[in-house]
């Protein structure tokens, strides 16, 4: 499976807990943040550093949809915490690994062996909020799941309900709302089960 778009697509505010390899199978993808821009064409790939917030502009080719995959790579080297956000990145990894979990301040406090107030304070000190991070990482999990290329390179049918539920969303509308609020697009623009010609 891969993410497929027949129309120009602008995904905003993406952030993954580990390094992410973006591979373009067809069309063009531009990755950018406030510091750098990387343009990719068919056959190109690029690794986005862990926990770096970025945008992804997707442009189909002439008469063909854009097709690209997202694959998480191994752990960051020691000290590779995203922009000094040690606690936030660690929590993002936990959420990404178990997105269906009930992520509350109490659960976070137990995980970090501190009070709920201290857990929230750690996130606040890093400019993060628990509920926003949960929503963002559930969406990252859904995009990653939907964009996995299977071993044979085939594109299987994706069930939007399965992607949403498997990523911890209570319903398809909750997933769609998160997609629009966090990434700026409707999931129907890039989640479909058709193979490119």
Image (cartoon, helix red, strand yellow):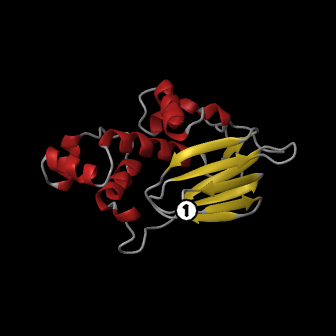
Residue tagged 1: 35
Along the line of sight, which residue is nearer the eye, 77 or 121?
A: 121
Q: Is residue 33 left or right of residue 151?
A: left
Q: Is residue 44 left or right of residue 118?
A: right
The residue depicted at 53 percent of the width and 37 percent of the height is 163
Outermost residue on the front side: it is 34
Along the line of sight, which residue is nearer the eye, 79 or 103?
A: 79
Q: Return the x and y of residue 173 as percentages of the image width and height.
A: 50, 24
Quadrant where the image shows the C terminus: top right
Along the line of sight, which residue is nearer the eye, 137 or 146?
A: 137
Residue 145 seen in the current view: no
Number of on-image labels: 1
The residue depicted at 58 percent of the width and 65 percent of the height is 47
Along the line of sight, which residue is nearer the eye, 51 or 157?
A: 51
**Regarding mark 1 in the picture, which secondary structure is present there?**
loop
Q: Return the x and y of residue 13 as percentages of the image width and height.
A: 51, 46
In the displayed structure, would residue 105 be above or below residue 73?
above
In the displayed structure, would residue 31 be above or below residue 64?
below
The residue depicted at 50 percent of the width and 63 percent of the height is 19
Outermost residue on the left side: it is 115
């Amino acid at each position: 499976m891969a993410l497929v778009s027949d129309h120009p697509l602008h995904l905003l505010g993406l952030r993954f807990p580990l390094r992410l390899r973006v591979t373009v199978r067809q069309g063009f993808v531009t990755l950018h943040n406030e510091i750098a821009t990387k343009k990719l064409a068919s056959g190109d790939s690029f690794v986005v550093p862990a926990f770096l917030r970025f945008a992804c502009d997707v442009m189909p080719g002439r008469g063909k949809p854009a097709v690209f995959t997202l694959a998480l790579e191994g752990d960051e080297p020691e000290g590779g915490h995203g922009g000094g956000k040690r606690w936030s990145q660690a929590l993002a990894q936990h959420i990404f690994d178990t997105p269906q979990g009930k992520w509350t301040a109490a659960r976070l406090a137990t995980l970090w062996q501190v009070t709920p107030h201290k857990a929230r304070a750690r996130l606040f000190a890093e400019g993060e909020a628990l509920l926003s991070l949960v929503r963002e990482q559930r969406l990252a999990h859904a995009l990653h799941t939907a964009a996995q290329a299977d071993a044979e390179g085939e594109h299987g049918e994706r069930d939007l309900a399965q992607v949403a539920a498997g990523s911890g969303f209570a319903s398809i509308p909750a997933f769609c709302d998160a997609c629009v609020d966090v990434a700026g697009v409707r999931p129907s623009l890039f989640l479909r089960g058709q193979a490119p010609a």
